[in-house]
Amino acid sequence: MTTVAVVEDDPRIRAAVCRGLTDRGHVVLAASTGLGALSEIVDHRPDVVVLDLGLPDIDGLELLRMLRAVSAVPVIVATARDDEREIIRTLDAGADDYVVKPYSADQLDARIRAVLRRVKDDEGGAPIQIGALAIHPLSRTVLLEGAPLELSRKEFDLLWHLANRRGEVVSKRELLAAVWRQPYGGAEKTIDVHLSWLRRKLGETANSPRYLRSVRGVGVMLVDPDSP
């Protein structure tokens, strides 16, 4: 059975979510505050977290950042905030999915199953070596010429997706859907920002690329810089 930690301060919503997930076969841990949830999650290590952003003690986005410092547990943000900038900011901070209230128990259950499938697929992947770049999905580590790179969660996800399509041009539309779980339109700037950060850590620039090659108007691809 899947263990789900539900972090929701509204007692009515919390009870309904817990009841709906329990009816669908999940074991549910419930918390009404951010700091209480952090302790619960660290102690009990649930399979997935459902997180509301409007918490009474700390903002849910701050809790998400605290979680990402200590755990790779999948997080589905479930909130009334529907502003696109807020959605992008939350996904960039490490959320795996974002659902806007109101939502049904069936929809949440489907999103939990989808997130856990993605985690299973990532964990089942073999390491990928591209030139002097080594990407290890199990430990979520990246080595460049034997030295570890400090990548954020989204930077790793972006690099891993490109690595699985190495040598192919991947569109921004696909990257938004696969890495940020967002439909295309208006949010492509976040890809450019993350590509810029990733290039810096790979020791290259857009004007002097090595591993990351942009194709104007099409997308970006990851290549072995030493291959002809």
Image: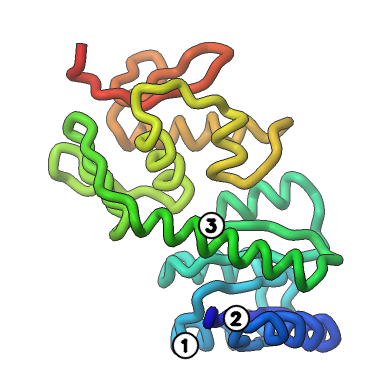
Q: Which mark is residue 188?
A: none
Residue 60: image quadrant is: bottom right
Residue 201: image quadrant is: top left
**Closer to the camera: disc 3 or disc 2?**
2
Question: Do the CB atoms of the residues marked 3 and 1 lie less than 8 Å apart?
Answer: no
Q: Where is residue 94 shown, x and y percent of the image?
A: 53, 57
Identify the element where label 1 is drawn: helix
117, 201: nearer the viewer:
117
Residue sitting at x 39%, y 19%? 213
Q: Where is residue 112 shown, x and y percent of the image?
A: 61, 67
Is residue 57 something that shows in the picture? no
Q: How many residues crowd around disc 3 within 10 Å: few (fewer than 14), some, or many (20 or more)?
A: many
Residue to which mark 3 is pinned: 94
Residue to which mark 1 is pinned: 44
* Quadrant for the C terminus in the image: top left
14, 85: nearer the viewer:
14
Q: Where is residue 80 shown, x and y percent of the image?
A: 82, 63
Question: Do the CB atoms of the residues marked 3 and 2 lie less than 8 Å apart?
Answer: no
Q: Amino acid at mark 2?
A: Ala
Residue sitting at x 62%, y 86%? 28
Is residue 48 placed above or below 173 in the rendered structure? Answer: below
Residue to which mark 2 is pinned: 5
Left or right? Give the position of 93 relative to 142: right
Q: CA distance from mark 2 to mark 1?
A: 9 Å
Identify the element where label 2 is drawn: strand
Q: Where is residue 9 shown, x and y percent of the image?
A: 76, 82
Q: Amino acid at mark 3?
A: Gly
Question: Do the CB atoms of the residues marked 2 and 1 lie less than 8 Å apart?
Answer: yes
Q: CA distance from mark 3 to mark 2?
A: 17 Å
Pick whichever of labels 2 and 1 is earlier in the sequence: 2
Is residue 92 something that shows in the picture? yes
Q: Amino acid at mark 1?
A: His
